[in-house]
Image: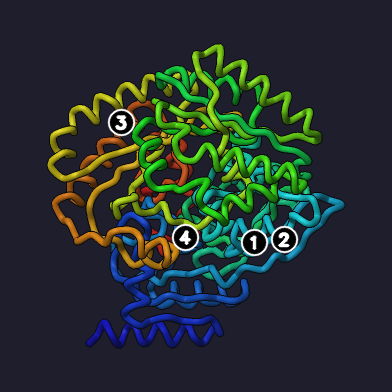
Amino acid sequence: MMATLAHQSIAEALAATGAEVLSDADSLDFYAHDIFSRGADLAAVVRPHTKQQLADAVGAATRAGHAVAPRGGGMSYTGGYTQTEPGTVLVDTGALDRIVEVNEEDTYVTVEAGCTWAKLYEHLQPLGLRTPMWGTLSGLKAVIGGGMSQNAIFWGTGRHGTAVESCLALEVVLADGTLMDVGAPFARPYGPDMVGLFLADTGALGIKAEITLKLVREAEANAYASFAFDSRDQLLATASQIERMGLASEVFGFDPHLNAIRMKRDSLASDAKQLVGMMRKQGGILKGLKEGARVALAGRDFLKDANYSLHVLAEGRSQNAADTDIKAARQIALAEGGREVENTIPKIIRANPFGPLNSILGPGGERWGPIHGLLPHSKAATFCNALDELFADEAERMNTHGIHYGILFAAVGGAGMVVEPCLYWPDAANPLIEQTMEAGHRARVPVLDSNAPAWKAVQAIKLRIVNLFYEHGASHFQIGRTYRYRDSLDPRADALLLAIKRELDPDGRMNPGSLGLD
């Protein structure tokens, strides 16, 4: 009874700010989940529609003794907003989705934190503009505030690096409800980089209200290539050299297990919506029809004999420039022992950059749990060999519980190689997954029962992989409550981080536990 009264009290205080408040049991249960797991029970969910409502709601919650945590599109799988202690007020920034300003002369755009990557891209496209890193594959749901808090990669990453490298300035809400500006909209940094303090922090230091990003011209032309390799070392060597030479806007690959999962799950050419999008992207009716026919003929069998596959996307101010980069990438791949295959995958995903998020379940209805690390090019192969040994050691447990895996690789401009092993296991989907998937696709995917023994095994295997990344000196995106960030810090750097946290959040109310800051 006391807990119910307390929840009613905080809900009333939040409602007084003018923000929308959710306190019913179903909503609180839904928002307690991320893609991977469920956190502790929430006291309330608040959905502000203005940045002032956001600031007022944060202040009201913390004055009442509640912790607060930001949630963007909910696409986290590392505990970025799920809580370890009950009673937190979760801030859903999804209603803060305005595009505030597009400044073409000074080449920046300011958006509210809940604006999705897809919405911004569609708004800028008629202007021939975009941000350097311009979204994640989950950008239909994932928001820009989340991309700044978690850091993120994919579109533009091969050349421009991660999401936070595109950020110029922020307006942030601190734990006491203060709105604070950091950075200048036309240049970063000016003096010590205070913008950087609030980037990749998983919401541990403040909640993003507005974000200002660089603008660049949209590419005039695109070119694509895909390659098959017999060994992982060939794939890694090729991807690394392509990144170092700056040839690709995106370069990513799959191991044999992930190739098999993708071929089983995706209809590729037979998906009419994706095929139409790809044909439109080619420009010109005849060219579009010819490209569509090639893709349709290739079907899903073009990788059936591939051990490892690598996909390269290049862009330029002219078709000749894009083709020249792809030609150079092709020479590298062939010299490393690769063979060129149909470039269906890069063509289709580039034409449909923010597709439906149906891959958050496996093709048999299995749960999906990615674990990733960013490694220097020189250490990626060594780590992968150690990962092979880990999976060999876990084979009996994985076979017992029906757990399998696939591995994604992606090169990050100026940084190195992402290695992302994804675990799949038979288990029931959670409410977030059910709401995120397209209803038609969900109806075609088996519904599985809850499987506590498999879930326990997956958690143990995931922890081993996280520790293996740490042992090999990897860094991570969306650190959340998963990766060993503070363990990796120099002691003086860790002390500085704690001092910053105390200054900005003396009572520890801002997303406690994120970044390992309890």
Q: Residue at x 42, y 46 (%)?
A: 479
Callout 3: SS: helix
Count the labels in the image: 4
Question: On the image, numbered disc 1 is attached to which residue?
Answer: 119
Q: Position of residue 136 (x, y in %)?
A: 55, 49
Residue at left 59%, top 16%?
332
The residues tagged by marks 1 and 3 sit, at their Cα atoms, a distance apart of 37 Å
Amino acid type, residue under disc 3 in the picture: Leu
Is there a contact, CB below 8 Å, between mark 3 and mark 2? no
Nearest to the observer: residue 309 or residue 135: 309
Label whose residue precedes the other's in the sequence (1 or 4): 1
Which quadrant is home to the N terminus? bottom left
- As rendered, which of 431 and 503 lies closer to the eye? 431
Mark 1: amino acid: Lys
Residue linked to disc 4: 505
Position in image of residue 229 (x %, y %)? 45, 21
| Residue 475 location, quadrant | top left
Which amino acid does the dot numbered 4 rest on?
Asp
Q: Earlier in the sequence, mark 3 or mark 2?
A: 2
Is tag 4's residue or tag 3's residue first in the polypeptide sequence?
Answer: 3
CA–CA distance in space, label 1 to label 2: 6 Å
Label 4: few (<14), some (14–19) or many (≥20) C-alpha neighbours in 10 Å: some
- In the rendered image, which residue does mark 3 sit on? 468
Distance between the alpha carbons at the discs numbered 4 and 2: 36 Å
Whichever of labels 1 and 3 marks the residue nearer the N terminus, that label is 1
Camera-side mark, 1 or 3? 1
